[in-house]
Image (cartoon, rainbow, N blue to C red):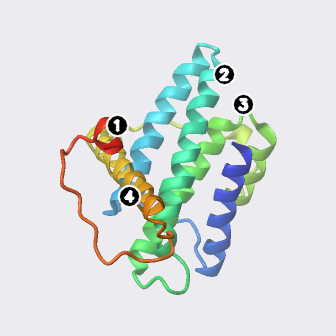
Amino acid sequence: LMLVLWNTYNFFITYAQVDDYSPNSKSVNDSKNVLDKWIISLLNKLILNVTESLDKYDAVLAIERIQDFVNDFSTWYIRRSRDRVGPSAENIQDKHDFYNTSYNVLTALTKLLAPIAPFISEEIYMNLTKEESVHLADWPKSNKKLINKELEEEMVNARKIVEASHALRKQAEIKVRIPIRSMTYNGPFEISDEVLSV
């Protein structure tokens, strides 16, 4: 968990410096990018779940939920957003939406992690915000209006299709680096494990 989180934070910091990004007051829910909306939905659900778990003194469940979120943030959101940042990214607004979203996710995440992993949370939070301490910051509050269950379900299906396509690539011995001219999916909107195993 700590290594994945640190690598994600390092990616953000590296490209934020390249693009000369600095946080502003722009609301993250202004972003039109589906990935931004999805990760913000997951973050707000995470805040609810971790708060509930810690209120019940169930740190194990809280850690499991944070770990699942960090994996989603790193292996799906960040990887899908790599071409949105850096000198080659042309869409300036989309670039700022990525940075604003990632900044808000990372700062909220460090607050949730602060009681569990105090030192790494402190390091990340203080460097991002320049504030005195994460342990003096207010606990994050969930905005239930930003939780989009339908979008979350659609993203689960999209990820299943991607995983199936990777399996087909492996079967055909086509490396991920090699572009495929076209790929189509003809099947149910709700993707089940049975469909993917065929």
Secondary element at image label 1 = helix
**Which mark is first along the chain, 1 or 4?**
4
Lateral position of residue 99 relative to residue 187, left or right: right
Residue 132 badge: none
User: Does the rendering let one see residue 107?
Assistant: yes
Percent position (x, y) of residue 95? 46, 74
Residue to which mark 3 is pinned: 115
Q: Which disc is residue 165 wearing?
A: 4
Mark 2 and mark 1 lie on one chain; the one further toward the N terminus is: 2
Q: Give how far apart the Cα atoms at labels 3 and 4 are.
A: 40 Å
- Tell me the CA gap for discs 4 and 1: 14 Å
Q: Tell me how far mark 2 sits from mark 3, CA to CA.
A: 9 Å
User: Closer to us: mark 1 or mark 3?
Assistant: 1
Callout 2 crowding tier (Cα within 10 Å): few <14, some 14–19, many ≥20: some
Distance from the alpha carbon under mark 1 to that under mark 3:
37 Å
Residue 100 position in % (x across, y down)? 49, 62
Q: Amino acid at mark 4?
A: Ser
Q: Earlier in the sequence, mark 2 or mark 3?
A: 2
Could you say whether the residue bearing mark 2 is in a helix, strand or loop? helix
Q: Residue at x 36, y 44 (%)?
A: 156
Instruction: Return the x and y of residue 180 as percentages of the image width and height.
Output: 36, 75
Question: Residue placed at 23% from the left, 58% from the top?
Answer: 185
Identify the mark nearer the N-term, 3 or 4: 3
Which quadrant of the figure has residue 22? bottom right
Q: CA distance from mark 2 to mark 1?
A: 31 Å
Circles 3 and 4, Cβ within 8 Å, touching? The answer is no
Amino acid of disc 2: Ala
Residue 99 against residue 163 in the figure, above or below: below
Q: In the displayed image of the protein, which residue is found farthest to the right?
A: 119
Q: On residue 59, which mark appears?
A: 2
Residue at mark 1:
193
